[in-house]
Image (spheres, helix red, strand yellow):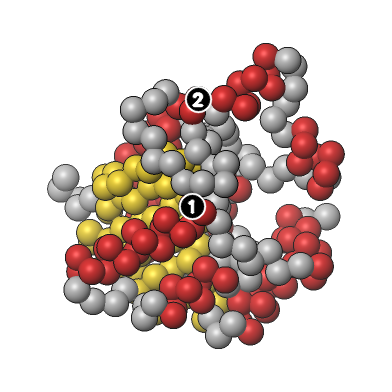
Amino acid sequence: MKPEQMEDARYKTADFGTISMEEELMLVMLHQYSSEQKRSLKVLDVGCGSGTVAKKIQEAGHTVKGIDFSEEALKRAKERGIDTAQCNLDEGIPEPSDSYDVVWEGDIVEHVFDPIGLLKESARVLKPGGHLMVTIPNDVGLVSRIKMLFGISHQEQMYMTSGFYKHHTFFTPRLIRFMLQKAGFRIVRFHKILNIGKRYRITLLPSMFFNEMVIEAEKKSSGS
């Protein structure tokens, strides 16, 4: 079964529209950036799913478009009033260059086969000085390290409960920093989150003590 067919099958059974703690923080970051710019923003929601987050962005007064490879997910997004387009992100982002103020990528970079390619495409469609907002897991957190000590893959639970594991790259803070720099971004904010039901912004502890990263990065000018 093709990946998009697997997603279509999932979205036929449920909406998967819960807004995560990390995405709530991204919404705050979006509001802060909009306030700094003193205007509403044009936002591209990459991997928009059923459009729950895109709807929140729209309700905040911004113009938003959602893209995803699941036809079934996009049907749900359209029902929420979201402008959408279907695409395979490993083949690029089908949007004009220099056309968005913000590219929003909530838990999507780890799902593509070429994350640096996706980040470069994100930079391409951003206007000069535009911002990328992204959430991504930290795959070297304490739980994963303990499991590995006992010979347990951190993929096991997902495979045993869902039959699949869709992350193609295992990320660390060092790796995502390298990829963002390679793609032409300058990090503006880097939040480190321990997701155990409450939000913690940990900045002075080693990478093993948090499991999610929320990053805001600015597209660098060609001369910088």
Question: What residue appears at the point 48 percent right and 66 percent down from the top-left corner?
Answer: 45
Mark 2 falls on what kind of element? helix
Residue sitting nearer the eye, 63 or 149: 149
Q: Residue 154 location in percent, x, y?
A: 69, 30
Q: Where is residue 193 in the image (x, y as percent from the top left)?
A: 46, 41
Residue hosting label 1: 22
Q: Which residue type carries mark 1?
A: Glu
Task: Measure the C-alpha gap from mark 2 to mark 1.
Answer: 18 Å
Residue 208: numbered disc: 2
Query: In terms of image quadrants, where is residue 40?
Result: bottom left
Q: In this view, does 22 lie above or below 101?
A: above
> Can you give x and y, in whole percent of width and height, for residue 87 in the image?
59, 66
User: Could you tell me which residue is drawn at 58 percent across and 37 percent down?
Assistant: 169
Q: Residue 101: give x, y in percent of width and height.
A: 31, 67
Q: In this view, does 68 lie to the left or right of 34?
A: right
Check disc 1 and report its element: helix, strand or loop: helix
The answer to which of 45 and 40 lies nearer the viewer is 40
Residue at 34 percent across and 42 percent down: it is 190
Q: Which residue lies furthest to the front in this view?
A: 198
Identify the amino acid type marked 2: Met
Residue 97 as seen in the image, left or right of residue 16 = left
Answer above or below: position of 49 versus 77.
above
**Displayed quadrant of residue 95:** bottom left
